[in-house]
Image (cartoon, rainbow, N blue to C red):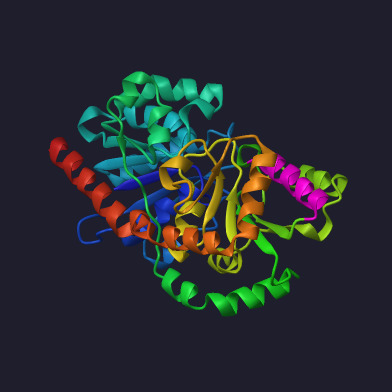
Amino acid sequence: MLLAIKGLATGGAERLLVDTVATGDAASFDYEVACVMADLNNLAPRLADLGIPVHQLGATGNLDVRWVPRFRRLLVEGRFDIVHFHLPYTAAIGRPTVLSLPSRSRPVTLYTEHCLWNKVSPPIKALNRLTVGTDRLVLAVSEASRGSLPDRLRRRARVVVHGIDQSLSPEVAAERPTIRRRIRKQLAVPDDDLLALTVAGLRAEKGYDLLLEAAHVVVGRNLPIRFAAAGDGTLAGELRARHKALGLGESFRFLGHRTDILELMAAADVVVLPSHQDGLPVVVMEATSIGTPIVATAQGGLPQAIEDGVNGLLVPPGDPDALVDALARLAADTHLLAELGRGALERRAAFDVARSTAEIEDLYRSLAAARC
């Protein structure tokens, strides 16, 4: 069983893959992972610790296709029954490689759409459209991801809401008061201020332009709200320059890459997702697992996970004033904030990795049986 993905950085799709494999039935499946990019390996050590082989294919960028013959050699030597592609780049180029094998030794392929099909770059989308029909099964992580697929794929795609490893969540939730005091002291956030945390890569689709504009409105209205953002990415320099131009100072702090995300969420009053596009981000699952409410834009897969007024608040996409109004409402109503937190915690079972892994492995068994 080979799972192929572009990288093993700390993105959402990568996290879901690793948590799924870590929870898998080792007695029934011999999992191996193929990683295309040479420098995106943050999560590889965890797989190695679990004894799961990780094959580094060594690409240095999207145009470096030297990984393709290495991938083909891996397929030949590994004699895999199933290859599960994650993310469009790997699938678009990996499928033709599988098809180049003799039919008698060709593995069954399937694909998981983690993002929104229509947001992928045109060349990769075109390659995917040409080859995805050879996959025996297409999965989507949310109804929004499924809905973005072309008609012929949407009709046969199946939604599998993935989950995360929640083993640390109860302990973090139980220690919340202590964690809250410690981290808010580190961030110099007053006890009475609402701390709004965003966890996302510094990329255009994550809506940091909207978030910075909202923070600017907050400062202008002198509201008791502080912002913190954990993540790094290609827009780091541009966003920091915009932060400076808006004069946000300590009201908005970029934290860079962090490994203590659950503790940051425990210290925060609310998690904010101002995304312009999203499938079903892992940050929603993490926040839910410890009972931190979410304020998010009503787009992509977010309305599937967030019920307005129950476990969070939804605002129109691209509207910084609506985002500020939602945060101001929570800053002024601690009872509502607590109610939304309880509502979030009640949804945690929906994102349990054991459930989603069992569902995925049942699909693997069906595919393997059909191949015989």
- State which quadrant residue 135 falls in: top left
As for residue 221 lying within the magenta part, the answer is: yes
Residue 255, how many percent across, how many down?
Answer: 70, 60
User: How far across and how far down the image is residue 166, in percent?
Assistant: 40, 65
Q: Residue, x 39% and y 39% (percent of image)?
A: 142
Residue 268, above or below 180: above
Q: Residue at x 54, y 60 (%)?
A: 337
Instruction: Give the magenta part as a residue range.
Output: 207-222
Q: Position of residue 355 (x, y in %)?
A: 28, 55
Residue 56 visible to the viewer: no
Quadrant including the C terminus: top left
Is residue 52 found left or right of 338 in the rendered image?
left
Indicate the quadrant where residue 46 lies.
bottom left
Residue at point 42% right, 62% down? 345
In this picture, is 271 found above or below 83?
A: below
- How many marks do you count on the picture? 0
Q: Nearer the viewer, residue 29 or 76?
A: 29
Tell me if residue 221 can be seen: yes
Q: x, y percentage for residue 98?
A: 34, 32
Seen in the picture, residue 340 relative to 359 is either above or below; the reply is: below
Q: Main secondary structure of the magenta part?
A: helix
- In screen coordinates, is 104 left or right of 215? left
Residue at 43%, 27% (x, y): give it.
148
Compared across the picture, whether 163 is left or right of 176 comes to: left
Residue 308 lies in the magenta stretch: no
> Camera-side residue: 21 or 339?
339
